[in-house]
Image (cartoon, helix red, strand yellow):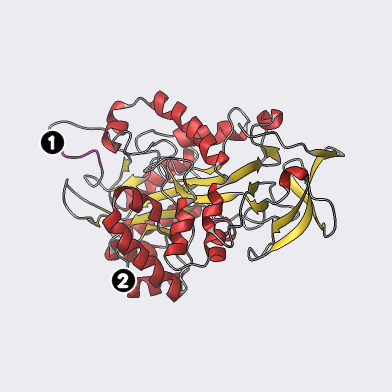
């Protein structure tokens, strides 16, 4: 258990003074006094010469971190295989475990996540998102994408006797009309984002190939846009990535085998790469080599890169490993940190209230023992977390958290 940080109450608010507060540009530190009221930052004032809070002395205060690719309804594959989780674990067990993993994510400093598929757990991410918003359970701000959309026969579990209809880890759809219907169903169930699989293997042991046509992907994107939502595309093959980019997907998840030509297309179209390096390291080290090379090329070409770890493939709470791997793949320490703050907030359409420590922003803060601009591994040394102005673990944690 962390010690509870004493907080100075000022007219219903909380005031924190720290000599190392990440500046809005994400590149240097300032001494600041921060006032938190009703879940938001209401003032950031210079504190040069002011007495630093004893409990923050020597610590580094950064905005709440954002992970753009998580699966809270999954747990690490080295504990239980993906197939067994989908086929043998009950929806109730998976949802209960997800509440624990949401807290672990929050305690690791990730105050916001984009959930990219419940993997057979229905609409549990929407329920968890809403329970957190209502203060029923603690956790990060969640952007839910529910079931993900896959082409028929192109997702798991697979390899069973074809006479049996085995439950899938995603929603199958085919054709332009089928894609529109699937998107509409997910939006009506509460999806904040739509996730599609632009490529996947078609049988056990086979390599991934493109699954949806360009027209099918365009239908999904257009239907989502009609509702003011965006599409994230799982894509690792060059052709799958190219089709998703041409269709208008906002983000490419993984993107491992993108060619230079396709990366240039991503740059031209403003498509964001979410490379999920930490997942590759956990379950496919050989793929990690190619993935890091792709990140290096994308970075050199000016493709926007956002932090997304694919936590769930590996243990929740270790999300910061993705930021370390981004640095190892060519991003500077500041760029990698921005990928999990400023950049991610912009991709989510929340650049006006997430990802920076500024007046009017959500009071999502993380106190670290070390300087992540010098060493990204400092992000593992979390000392305190505030979510919407409430310190994690404090008596106020049950207060309603604003959107």
Q: Is residue 73 left or right of residue 61?
A: left
Placement of 163 over or under 109, stated as above or below: above
Which residue is nearer to you in this view: 110 or 345?
A: 110
From this view, report whether residue 327 is shown above or below residue 195: below
Q: Secondary structure at mark 1?
A: loop
Check the picture and name the quadrant holding the N terminus: top right
Residue position for label 1: 162
178 and 127: which is toward the camera: 127
Reading the image, the residue beneath label 2 is 259
Measure the C-alpha gap from mark 2 to mark 1: 36 Å
Give the extent of the magenta segment. Answer: 156-161
Check disc 2 and report its element: helix, strand or loop.
loop
Quarter holding the C terminus is top right
Question: Residue at 66% across / 46% down in the picture?
Answer: 364
Q: Nearer the viewer, residue 70 or 286?
A: 286
Q: Quadrant of residue 359?
A: bottom right
């Amino acid at each position: 258990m962390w010690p509870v940080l004493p907080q100075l109450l000022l007219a219903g608010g909380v005031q924190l003074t720290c000599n190392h507060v990440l500046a809005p540009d994400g590149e240097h530190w300032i001494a600041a006094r921060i006032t938190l009221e009703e879940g938001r930052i209401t003032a950031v004032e210079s504190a040069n010469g002011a007495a630093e809070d004893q409990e923050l002395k020597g610590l580094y205060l950064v905005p709440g971190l954002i992970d753009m690719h998580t699966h809270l309804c999954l747990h690490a594959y080295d504990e239980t295989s993906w197939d067994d989780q989908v086929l043998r674990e009950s929806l109730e067990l998976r949802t209960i475990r997800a509440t624990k993993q949401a807290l672990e994510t929050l305690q690791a400093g990730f105050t916001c996540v984009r959930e990219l598929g419940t993997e057979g757990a229905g609409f549990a991410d929407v329920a968890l998102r809403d329970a957190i918003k209502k203060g029923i359970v603690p956790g990060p701000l969640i952007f839910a994408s529910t079931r993900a959309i896959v082409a028929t026969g192109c997702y798991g579990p697979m390899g069973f006797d074809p006479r049996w209809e085995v439950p899938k880890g995603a929603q199958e759809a085919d054709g332009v009309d089928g894609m529109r219907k699937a998107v509409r169903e997910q939006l009506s169930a509460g999806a904040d984002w739509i996730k599609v699989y632009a490529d996947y293997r078609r049988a056990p042991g086979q390599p991934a190939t493109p699954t949806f046509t360009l027209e099918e992907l365009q239908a999904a994107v257009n239907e989502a846009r009609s509702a003011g939502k965006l599409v994230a595309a799982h894509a690792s093959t060059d052709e799958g990535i190219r089709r998703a980019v041409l269709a208008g997907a906002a983000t490419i998840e993984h993107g491992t085998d993108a060619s230079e030509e396709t990366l240039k297309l991503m740059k031209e179209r403003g498509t964001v790469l979410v490379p999920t390096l930490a997942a590759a390291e956990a379950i496919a080290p050989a793929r990690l080599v190619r993935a890091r090379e792709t990140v290096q090329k994308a970075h050199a070409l000016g493709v926007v890169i956002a932090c997304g770890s694919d936590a769930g493939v590996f243990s929740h709470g270790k999300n910061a490993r993705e930021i370390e791997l981004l640095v190892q793949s060519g991003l500077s320490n500041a760029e990698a940190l921005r990928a999990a703050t400023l950049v991610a907030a912009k991709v989510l359409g929340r650049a006006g209230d997430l990802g920076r420590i500024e007046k009017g922003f959500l009071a999502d803060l993380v106190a670290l023992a070390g300087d992540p601009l010098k060493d990204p591994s400092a992000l593992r040394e979390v000392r305190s977390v505030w979510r919407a102005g409430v310190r994690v673990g404090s008596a106020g944690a049950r207060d309603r958290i604003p959107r």
